[in-house]
């Protein structure tokens, strides 16, 4: 079956989309990568089929979806209005012949109605059962993305998580699960899978793992809520909506929102999920630059 499936991977230029595309290819799935900057996609994926896809430009939807059986759907962070972007795109995908959608949501989206992912999950449910929702917890790769400049410039991790523990999940494991679903979607129809790492750890422990991996001290500095919001808005230049979402998600860690360890990755992949120690050693060069 795998050789007959063409998967459209959205936001393929990002951390998650890139890894999903790689996993699909390694599994033998025909893969098309899509994003707003097609030239960049051609550079990153030489020889692979590419398509320009902008959720704000419906003229790009049909060409990107053409002849695709499956869809990996990811919400670009700047998009907040799901009712005019991802939800109608889901409908357009089914109308174009897509037989299964894997949507990258977030842990707790089923109960957190204020996160944009909740509306997409609800829309998928209304459309039928040809979908699988992946609900990862906090990505280990946030350390080389959202937290990167704080680590490189200031030798610190700066978030308002207090002593909350987090079962960080490696994007590569999430991508491997997505590829498994695409290769054999029937057992996963109309299911939501929570994906976490193998253990819950504090940001102090994350800082220790980073320090060991890169050979210089990294500290965890507990941010206040207003201090963190100011930091994101005026130092990192994030839009206010994204500042609010980031702040609320990190404050939720204080109450244990992301500390529960789920066995789904080990059950699906037949091996333990990657640990924070493994991830930081693999990506050490990122923070040395």
Image (cartoon, grey):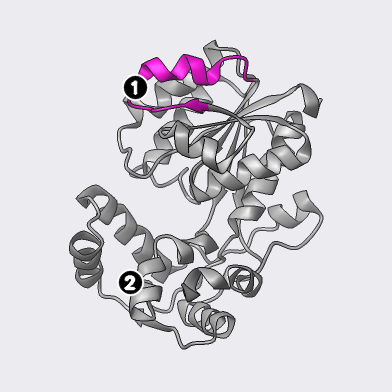
| Position of residue 220 measured from the top left corner of the image (x, y, whole percent) | 40, 81
Residue at mark 1 to residue at mark 2: CA–CA distance: 36 Å
Above or below: residue 81 compared with residue 282: above
Q: Position of residue 49 (x, y in %)?
A: 60, 27
Q: Is residue 72 visible?
A: yes
Label 2: few (<14), some or many (≥20) within 10 Å?
many
Query: Which element is circle 1 on?
Result: loop
Was residue 67 drawn as part of the magenta stretch in this picture? yes
Q: Residue at x 77, y 52 (%)?
A: 269
Vertical relation: 61 (above or below) 30? above
The number of callouts visible is 2
- Residue at the image position 54 percent from the left and 81 percent from the top: 214
Residue 160's label in the rendered image is: 2
Q: Is residue 243 left or right of residue 182?
A: left
Question: Based on the displayed image, in which of its 4 quarters is residue 226 positioned?
Answer: bottom left
Q: Quadrant of the N terminus?
A: top right
Q: Name the residue that disc number 1 marks.
A: 57
Q: Position of residue 176 (x, y in %)?
A: 69, 47
Foreground: 47 or 30? 47
Check disc 1: other Cα within 10 Å, few if <14, some if 14-19, many if 20+.
Answer: few
**Seen in the image, is 125 located left or right of residue 148?**
right
Nearer-the-camera pick, 241 or 193: 241
Label 2 sits on a secondary structure element that is loop
Q: For the magenta stretch, what is the residue range? A: 51-68
Residue 12 visible somewhere in the drawing: no
Name the residue at 31% across, 53% down: 245
The location of residue 208, given as percent across then percent down, is: 52, 84
- Position of residue 158 relative to residue 13, above or below, is below
Label whose residue precedes the other's in the sequence (1 or 2): 1
Decide if residue 101 is on the left or right side of residue 14: right
């Amino acid at each position: 079956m795998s050789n007959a499936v063409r998967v459209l991977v959205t936001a393929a230029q990002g951390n998650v989309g890139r890894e999903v595309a790689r996993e699909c290819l390694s599994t033998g799935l025909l893969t098309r990568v899509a994003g707003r900057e097609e030239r960049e996609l051609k550079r990153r994926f030489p020889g692979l089929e590419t398509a320009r896809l902008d959720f704000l430009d419906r003229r790009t939807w049909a060409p990107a979806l053409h002849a695709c059986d499956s869809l990996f759907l990811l919400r670009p962070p700047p998009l907040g209005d799901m009712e005019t972007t991802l939800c109608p795109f889901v409908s357009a995908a089914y109308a174009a012949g897509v037989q299964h959608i894997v949507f990258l949501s977030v842990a707790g989206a089923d109960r957190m109605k204020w996160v944009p992912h909740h509306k997409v999950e609800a829309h998928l449910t209304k459309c039928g059962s040809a979908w699988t929702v992946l609900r990862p917890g906090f990505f280990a790769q946030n350390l080389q993305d959202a937290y990167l400049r704080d680590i490189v410039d200031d030798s610190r991790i700066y978030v308002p998580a207090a002593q909350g523990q987090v079962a960080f999940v490696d994007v590569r494991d999430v991508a491997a699960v997505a590829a498994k679903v695409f290769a054999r979607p029937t057992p996963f129809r109309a299911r939501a899978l929570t994906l976490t790492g193998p253990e819950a750890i504090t940001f102090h422990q994350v800082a220790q793992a980073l320090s060991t991996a890169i050979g210089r001290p990294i500290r965890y500095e507990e941010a206040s809520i207003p201090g963190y919001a100011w930091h994101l808005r005026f130092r990192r230049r994030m839009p206010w909506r994204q500042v609010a979402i980031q702040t609320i998600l990190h404050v939720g860690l204080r109450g244990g929102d992301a500390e529960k360890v789920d066995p789904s990755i080990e059950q699906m992949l037949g091996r333990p999920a990657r640990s924070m120690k493994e991830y930081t050693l693999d990506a050490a060069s990122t923070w040395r630059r």
